[in-house]
Image (cartoon, grey):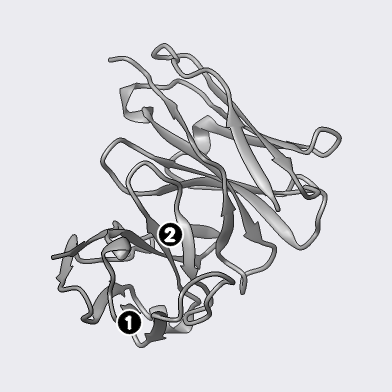
Amino acid sequence: QLQLQESGPRLVKPSETLSLTCTVSGGSISSSTHYWGWIRQPPGKGLEWIGSISYSGTTYYNLSLKSRVTISVDTSKNQISLRLSSVTAADTAVYFCARRGGDATRNYFDYWGQGTLVTVPS
Amino acid sequence: SYELTQPPSVSVSPGQTASITCSGDKLGDKYACWYQQRPGQSPVLVIYQDFKRPSGIPERFSGSNSGNTATLTISGTQAMDEADYYCQTWDSRTEVFGGGTKLTVL
C-alpha cells in the first residue's frame, strides 16, 4: 500500500522559507506514470494546489505562488520537497503531498499524505 | 484563470439522494474528479474521470459531467457521508479545485 508522509518544521517565522519533505513508501517515486503534488488548506478553508513534479524533475506551479515556490525530487530517497519563500501568516495551512496520474487524462490525486500543519505567526 | 464554483452547503435527509454541483466554463470538455474530506482527515478520491469510482468507494457514489456542470450524486445517503466535498479539474497546466461543499445529513 502506497503511503506518503509529510515532515518538516511546524512553525516558520514571517519572511523566512518554509521547507517540507514528503517521503513515499510502498512504491517508487521513479515512475513515469505519475506526478507528485503539493496541496495546502488554510484552517477552515478549501484546498489550494501549490505545484507538481515528475520523477524526472518536470515541474508546474500555481501561478499565484510561482515566484515563491520550488518543488524538487530526490529519487534516491524516494522523496519530494517543497520550499516556499517569504512566508506570511497567509501561508499558515495544512500542507499535503499527493500522487497524481502522469498525463492530462489522469488529472486526479489518488493517494494523499496525512498532512502537516505549518503555522506562520502574524 | 479557470475557476470552479460549488455551492457552500447542501443538506439531505438520511436515505435520500444528495447532489452536489461543480460549475466551470466548458467543464464537460475536461475530466472532473471529486474528493471527500471528513474533519481532520485527508481528502479521499471518490470519483475520477467524471464518473469512475476508485476501488473501495461505495456504489452509492456516482458522477456525471456535461456542458458547464459536473455533478456528484450520493444515493441512499448515510450519516457517514457527512463531509466536505471538493471537485477538481485540470486546465492549462494548472490543477483547479472548487471551493468545496459541506454536505449535512440531517
- Of B46 and B86, nearer the camera is B46
Rendered view: A63 above or below A14 = below
- Of A30 and B11, nearer the camera is B11
Q: Residue furthest top?
A: A13
Q: Position of residue B87 (x, y in %)?
A: 38, 65
**Label 1 element class:** loop
Instruction: Identify the residue at horizontal 27%, vertical 74% (top origin).
Output: B77
Would residue B74 appear left or right of B63 to someone viewing this image? left
Q: Position of residue A105 (x, y in %)?
A: 61, 74
Residue placed under numbered mark 1 in the picture: B68
- Of A44 and B16, nearer the camera is B16
Circle 1 Cα neighbour tier, 10 Å, few/some/many (<14 / 14–19 / ≥20): some
Would residue B53 appear left or right of B75 to someone viewing this image? right
Numbered mark located on residue A75 in the image: none
Give the quarter of the image for residue A40.
top left
| Dot 2 amino acid type | Val
Instruction: Identify the residue at horizontal 20%, vertical 73% (top origin).
Output: B14
Numbered mark located on residue B96 in the image: 2
Identify the subunit bearing mark 2.
B
Q: Position of residue A49 (x, y in %)?
A: 47, 48
Instruction: Identify the residue at horizontal 70%, vertical 63% (top origin).
Output: A102
Q: Earlier in the sequence, mark 1 or mark 2?
A: 1
Rendered view: A59 above or below A19 = below
**Label 2 element class:** strand
Rendered view: A86 above or below B69 = above
Would residue B21 appear left or right of A51 to someone viewing this image? left
